Image (cartoon, rainbow, N blue to C red):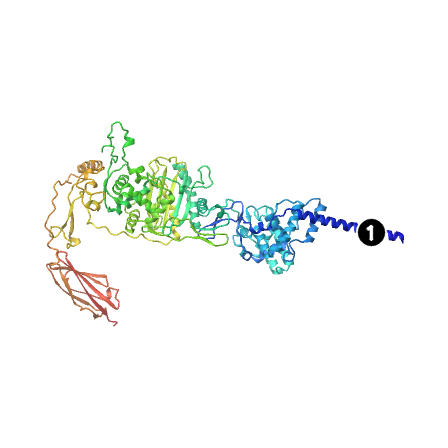
């Protein structure tokens, strides 16, 4: 008994000692834990989670680029994720998520024992709450201290956040490999759909990846392992009664298609980088890093066509013409939307400095600047039929008309300016319409002088060219591309011509949303009239006129398959070639050259880029409605001869061909004939350049350009007279003083419809006899007949008595109008009208 009693005492002592040890360990551990420096949970609530700013095309469905290259993340609410992916995540990561207090003690003990037995710290067992704490507040090391902090903070986090809030945080911050974070980003990257639309199998895959994102990547070499883990997720879901056996079976057999991996991660890179700069300037870098959603103006389908065309043509441009780079821009002139922008032939090429955006670079536009100059001239009263002389002309006032400097010691190449024509032909008189369409240089320089350098620069600025600032810098070379412009601005400015004179500033962004879906920006058009519609129509009418278009451009323009205006340009030093053209609903500009501004082959012309332009334009317009250009108002012949196509002289008068006297306001147009006095001079001889429709200058020789222009014209005329000896100049100009006395109100006819009487009822199938009475100074010669405005016949044998069958006219209604226009023998005319109805029998 004593031994037994002794053993009991020993056992009791051991138990007491053990309990004391446990209490000491627990107390010591508690004291140690209490001394640990814990992260502030307020830091968790107040932290900002970096999100991705995403740039989309105009449909909002094509992701062009995710600006946050280190972390791509889109924060979504739990309600914006599929319940299937929520269940799948819980099933594989933390089946007791909704019942534990933040940690699972059994899992912790199991992990500790495993670590002890394994001799290292490899065992997991973390709850979803622990993973949120670990990813958000703690370092990634595996020390005991960090693990204890994780347990304590998980318990605390469960007291300040609901389970759904914790799950939402986890799903938004869990890594899926590479730069992809969060369920929404992974769903878009892997399947191209929002997290709300995931199928059960897709949800299982997304739940499977986070355990080892690199190993289980669908783009890696362990696809079998990923499939197996996906099936494990489904099995767990089935065992937890989250899905039925049937759902498990269907999802297990479903063949899920992952999107191909986009290694470059960027579409339309030059456009995207331009948009990024815009966002940074407007909202600041901090806002851009907080997850904006940006809907741009880019038409990605059109962009792909442009890139394909550039890929096709760029190699031959480089090989044949030493043009290593190419750019193209397309804009909708009705809105200003940039639909396509290719800033170089290869954004990623270091050989051509490919990431440099040529569309925004300052380059000389060559002859593509000419329409702005001609538009300025038309605003001032000149017309497309204004005559200029395309003859070798000296424009520098520092040089004599023959090209010799006024200062004998001066270098002619530096002080004289006499541009050449590209074909070395100088045909003489030429109307502005032809000169612009054929891109003639000398008439263009003359037009710039007539319209004014400053005034032409102002027109260009009004249309959208903002890079020309100093008129004294350019002088008369401006019209041949002496200034510098951006391709994007040039295309936008041509859009004013396409849009009937109305300017819509080019834009790249339609909508911007913050990371909570609030609208930061939603743009609207702000159209402004930049030039009068009539002026825009005149330019479009010339550039789309197939009768005067350059032969080299005709097949290219015809290939577009609809009316198109087109203009080319080449700089004198062969550094830039351009083609800009448009329909009423699309403007496209293409450029070729070298980014480092080195010249191309010296035999190139603007048309070398035209085939590229035409190939893209013909594809781009296929999806657009066909529209015709609005015609300009008809030109009259009442202006000065040099303004309506007559080069033989600047003095004329209108004669009545019947009386031979001066025509009056009563003279019918058919009887008017212009008589021009043959006296050949420069246009400066006949009009004041500042007021072309006003009185002729009293001393034209006072104009600084007069002597040079007149010398060139007279030199040409000497050769012309040799070939045309019958052409005789008139030194004496006398205009008749007697006025037309044949065409007067008193002598004009007056006509009356006797039959049928007004408001008659007639049988449309029967013969309708029309009887007229006429009075006037001359006998009736013919009568034109119309029913409801439609031409019926012309009666000549008996202009006062004729017949026709109304039904044959074919446009009868219940109430109809009979109109007659009677002409007398000297072309005076009068009109009469009668109404009638028709019987139904």
Residue 126 horizontal side relative to residue 833, left or right: right
In the picture as drawn, the residue positioned furthest to the bottom comes out as 841
- Given residues 801 and 606, the one toward you in this image is 606
In the picture as drawn, the residue positioned furthest to the right comes out as 1
Q: Is residue 418 above or below residue 158?
A: above
Residue 517 horizontal side relative to residue 167, left or right: left
Image quarter in which the C terminus is found: bottom left
Residue 56 horizontal side relative to residue 700, left or right: right
Query: Could you say where residue 172 lies in the image, as x and y percent from the top left?
Result: 56, 52
Residue 168 horizontal side relative to residue 347, left or right: right
Examine the rendering and report whether any part of residue 142 can be seen.
Answer: yes
* Tag 1 secondary structure: helix
Query: Could you say where residue 535 lies in the image, as x and y percent from the top left?
Result: 28, 49
Examine the rendering and report whether any part of residue 795 can be seen.
Answer: no
Label 1: few (<14), some or many (≥20) within 10 Å? few
Seen at 26% across and 67% down, the residue is 813
Query: Could you say where residue 428 lies in the image, as x and y percent from the top left?
Result: 23, 39
Image quarter in which the N terminus is found: bottom right
Query: Could you say where residue 649 lies in the image, as x and y percent from the top left?
Result: 17, 43
- Given residues 142 and 63, the one toward you in this image is 142
Q: How many marks?
A: 1
Q: Which residue is mark 1?
A: 11
- Given residues 768 and 162, the one toward you in this image is 162
In the picture as drawn, the residue positioned furthest to the top comes out as 409
């Amino acid at each position: 008994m004593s031994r037994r009693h002794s053993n009991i005492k020993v056992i009791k002592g051991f138990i007491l000692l053990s309990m004391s040890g446990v209490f000491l360990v627990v107390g010591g551990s508690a004291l140690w834990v209490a001394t640990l420096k814990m992260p502030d949970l307020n830091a968790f609530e107040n932290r900002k989670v970096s999100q991705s700013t995403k740039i989309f095309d105009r449909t909002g469905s094509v992701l062009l680029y995710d600006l946050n290259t280190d972390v791509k993340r889109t924060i979504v609410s739990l309600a914006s994720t599929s319940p299937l992916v929520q269940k799948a995540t819980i099933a594989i990561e933390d089946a007791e998520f909704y019942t534990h207090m933040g940690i699972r003690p059994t899992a912790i003990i199991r992990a500790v024992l495993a670590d002890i037995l394994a001799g290292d710290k490899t065992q997991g067992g973390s709850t979803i709450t622990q993973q949120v704490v670990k990813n958000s507040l703690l370092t990634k090391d595996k020390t005991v201290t960090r693990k204890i902090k994780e347990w304590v903070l998980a318990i605390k986090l469960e007291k300040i956040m609901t389970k759904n809030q914790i799950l939402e945080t986890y799903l938004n911050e869990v890594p899926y490999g590479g730069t992809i974070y969060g369920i929404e980003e992974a769903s878009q990257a892997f399947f191209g759909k929002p997290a709300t639309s995931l199928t059960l199998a897709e949800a299982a895959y997304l739940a499977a990846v986070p355990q080892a994102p690199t190993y289980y990547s669908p783009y890696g070499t362990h696809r079998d392992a990923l499939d197996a883990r996906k099936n494990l997720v489904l099995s767990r879901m089935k065992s937890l009664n989250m899905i039925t056996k049937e759902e498990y079976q269907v999802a297990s057999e479903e063949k899920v298609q992952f999107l191909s991996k986009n290694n470059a991660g960027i579409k339309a890179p030059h456009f995207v980088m331009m948009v990024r700069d815009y966002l940074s300037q407007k909202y600041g870098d901090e806002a851009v890093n907080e997850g904006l959603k940006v809907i741009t103006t880019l038409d990605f389908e059109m962009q792909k066509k442009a890139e394909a065309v550039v890929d096709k043509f760029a190699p031959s441009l480089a090989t044949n013409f030493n043009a290593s780079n190419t750019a193209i821009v397309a804009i909708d002139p009705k809105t200003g939307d940039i639909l396509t922008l290719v800033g170089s032939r290869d954004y990623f090429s270091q050989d051509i400095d490919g990431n440099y955006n040529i569309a925004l670079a300052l380059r000389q536009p060559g002859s593509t600047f000419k329409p702005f100059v001609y538009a300025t001239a038309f605003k001032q009263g000149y017309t497309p039929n204004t005559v200029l002389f395309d003859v070798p002309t000296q424009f520098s006032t520092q040089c004599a008309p023959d090209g010799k400097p006024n200062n004998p010691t001066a270098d002619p190449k530096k002080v004289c300016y006499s541009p050449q024509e590209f074909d070395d032909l100088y045909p003489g008189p030429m109307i502005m319409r032809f000169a612009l369409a054929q891109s003639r240089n000398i008439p263009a320089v003359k037009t710039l002088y007539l319209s004014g350098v400053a005034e032409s620069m102002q027109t260009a600025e009004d249309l959208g060219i903002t890079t020309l600032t100093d008129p004294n810098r350019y002088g008369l070379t401006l019209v041949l591309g002496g200034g510098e412009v951006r391709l994007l601005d040039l295309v936008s400015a041509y859009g004013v011509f396409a849009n009937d004179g109305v300017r819509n500033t080019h834009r790249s962004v339609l909508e911007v949303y913050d990371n909570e879906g609030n609208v930061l920006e939603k743009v609207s058009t702000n159209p402004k009239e930049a030039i009068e519609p009539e002026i825009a129509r005149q330019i479009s009418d010339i550039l789309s006129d197939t009768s005067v278009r350059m032969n080299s451009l005709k097949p290219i323009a015809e290939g577009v398959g609809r009316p198109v205006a087109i203009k080319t340009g080449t700089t004198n030093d062969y550094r830039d070639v351009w083609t800009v053209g448009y329909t009423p609903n699309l403007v496209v500009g293409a450029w070729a050259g070298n980014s480092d501004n080195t010249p191309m082959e010296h035999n190139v012309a603007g048309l070398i880029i035209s085939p590229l332009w035409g190939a893209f334009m013909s594809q781009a317009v296929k999806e657009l409605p066909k529209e015709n250009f609005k015609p300009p108002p008809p030109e009259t012949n009442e202006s000065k001869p040099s303004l309506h196509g007559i080069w033989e002289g600047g003095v004329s008068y209108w004669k009545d061909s019947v009386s031979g006297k001066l025509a009056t306001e009563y003279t019918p147009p058919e009887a008017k004939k212009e008589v021009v006095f043959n006296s050949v001079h420069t246009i400066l001889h006949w009009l004041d350049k500042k007021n072309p429709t006003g009185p002729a200058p009293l001393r034209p020789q006072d104009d600084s350009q007069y002597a040079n222009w007149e010398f060139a014209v007279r030199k040409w005329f000497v050769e012309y007279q040799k070939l045309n000896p019958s052409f005789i100049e008139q030194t004496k100009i006398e205009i008749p003083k007697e006025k037309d006395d044949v065409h007067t109100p008193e002598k004009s006819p007056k006509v009356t419809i006797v039959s049928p009487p007004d408001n008659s009822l007639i049988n449309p199938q029967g013969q309708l006899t029309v009887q007229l009475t006429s009075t006037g100074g001359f006998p009736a010669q013919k009568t034109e007949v119309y029913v409801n405005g439609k031409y019926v016949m012309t009666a000549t044998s008996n202009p006062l008595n004729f017949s026709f069958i109304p039904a044959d006219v074919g446009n009868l209604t219940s109430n109809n109008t009979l109109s007659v226009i009677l002409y007398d023998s000297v072309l005076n005319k009068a009109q009469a009208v009668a109404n009638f109805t028709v019987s139904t029998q």
